[in-house]
Image (spheres, helix red, strand yellow):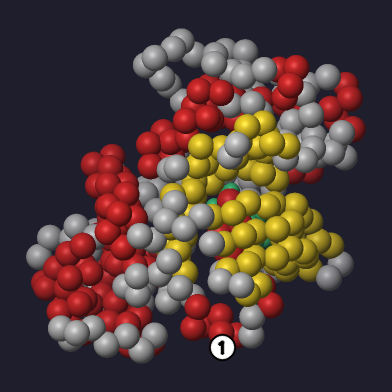
């Protein structure tokens, strides 16, 4: 349904650009939940923005295509982008509460999304707004609709932003760390809501998070990013039971599991340092399985099994993790 090919995004200015995302390719299938994981700074948000052709301050799209419904989103004129965003692709940005206007009741803000896209609900806008606020699990939705953002908790604001993103029932919804900063109960509720949404309106979701546990429980497939590259992508099952990339294994070793002892050898050491990346494998300096050659070999995703690809030239020798 949506296909990303060779996406590369830079930050900087005329004199000096540095790449935040390089050569990222993947697809999002109709109705699926795809997760995107990786340490902070790995480029997850940059990918999320690029799928809607949003450019953050000081960034440029250097290369790539994002094909959606037969069009390259990165080539669309502004008027077509405005019509597409929110209508065909919904977006819940990281820190979604900053995307709410402080001066308008939240009900009016949800109504504004419907009005902007020319949607006339059969039962009227007001009823639809209340229905949407109800569907994201807000109690007393008619009362909440009259409130201003500052009168709501962070979790409630987050749900209002999700209600805005689903208002037009888009075929794809991108959610960037939608549960960060929320308490565990609210997080669990939002995860249930998202799983529910997919069933109810059939939307595909791109769920960006560094919370691997949440990703594996929610997503059909998960992509793992490191230093701006996609290093592995597969079904949740494939990654949980047979991750191939030493980086994926390292990330997973940092998640406590009841069913097996911690894998100390795989555990990630050090931090992602963007200023010290070599020509070849970007993870090599931190990789417990690296050999000298790795630092010189540019890594490309290779197919390991149907739906499962990894960018590690040693994947055959290293075998599966399980
Ligand atoms: P993630 O969402 O995985 O934490 P981001 O996509 O936010 O990662 O960032 C990817 C890289 O781009 C990081 O190295 C980050 O420092 C850099 N970056 C992000 N936003 C900007 C910006 N506005 N200006 C310069 N560099 C940025
Ligand atoms: Mg981010």
Look at the image and tell me in which quarter the N terminus lies.
Answer: bottom right
Q: Residues within 10 Å of mark 1 (few under 14, many from 20)?
A: few
Vertical order, 189 against 10 (above or below): above
With respect to residue 275, does 168 lie above or below?
below
Q: Quadrant of residue 312?
A: top right
Residue sitting nearer the eye, 268 or 305:
305
Front in this rendered view, residue 169 or 20: 169
- Can residue 73 be seen here? The reply is no
Up/down of 187 relative to 15, above or below: above
List x then y, in percent, for residue 98.
41, 67
Q: Quadrant of ligand 1?
A: bottom right
In the picture shown, does residue 214 fall above or below 138? above
Residue ranking furthest to the top: 261
Please provide percent x and percent y for residue 129: 21, 76
Residue 179 % position (x, y): 37, 49
On the rendered structure, is 16 left or right of 248?
Answer: right
- In the picture, measured across the screen, residue 61 lies left or right of residue 207, that is right
Q: Residue at x 65, y 59 (%)?
A: 4
Residue at image point 53% right, 30% down = 239
Q: Is mark 1 within 8 Å of ligand 1?
A: no
Most foreground residue, 166 or 16:
166
Question: Is residue 67 toward the left or the right of residue 7 in the image?
Answer: left
Residue that numbered label 1 is attached to:
79
Identify the residue at horizontal 26%, vertical 75% (top origin). Answer: 106
Say what secondary structure mark 1 lies in.
helix
Quadrant where the C terminus lies? Answer: top right
Judge left or right: residue 178 versus residue 140.
Answer: right
């Amino acid at each position: 349904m949506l296909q990303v090919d060779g996406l590369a995004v830079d930050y900087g200015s005329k004199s000096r650009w540095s790449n935040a995302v390089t050569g990222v390719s993947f697809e999002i299938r109709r109705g699926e939940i795809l997760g995107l994981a990786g340490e902070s700074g790995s480029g997850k948000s940059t990918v999320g923005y690029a799928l809607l052709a949003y450019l953050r301050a000081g960034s440029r799209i250097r290369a790539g295509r994002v094909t959606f419904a037969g069009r390259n989103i990165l080539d669309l004129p502004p008027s077509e982008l405005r019509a597409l965003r929110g209508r065909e692709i919904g977006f819940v940005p990281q820190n979604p509460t900053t995307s709410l206007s402080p001066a308008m009741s939240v009900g009016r803000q949800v109504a504004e999304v419907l009005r902007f896209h020319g949607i006339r609900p059969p039962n009227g806008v007001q009823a639809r707004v209340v229905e949407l606020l109800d569907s994201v699990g807000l109690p007393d939705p008619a009362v909440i609709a009259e409130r201003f953002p500052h009168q709501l908790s962070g979790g409630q604001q987050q749900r209002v932003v999700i209600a805005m993103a689903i208002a037009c029932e888009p075929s794809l919804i991108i959610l960037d760390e939608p549960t960060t900063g929320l308490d565990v109960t609210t997080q669990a509720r939002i995860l249930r809501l998202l799983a529910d949404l997919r069933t109810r309106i059939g939307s595909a979701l791109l769920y960006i998070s560094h919370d691997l546990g949440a990703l594996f429980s929610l997503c059909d497939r998960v992509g793992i990013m490191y230093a701006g590259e996609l290093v592995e992508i597969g079904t949740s099952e494939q990654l949980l039971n047979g991750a191939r990339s030493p980086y994926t294994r390292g990330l997973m070793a940092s998640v406590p599991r009841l069913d097996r002892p911690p894998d100390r050898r795989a555990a990630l050491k050090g931090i992602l340092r963007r200023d010290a990346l070599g020509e070849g494998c970007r993870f090599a300096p931190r990789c417990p399985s690296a050999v000298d050659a790795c630092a010189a070999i540019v890594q490309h995703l290779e197919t390991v099994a149907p739906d499962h690809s990894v960018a590690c030239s040693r994947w055959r020798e290293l075998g599966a993790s399980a």
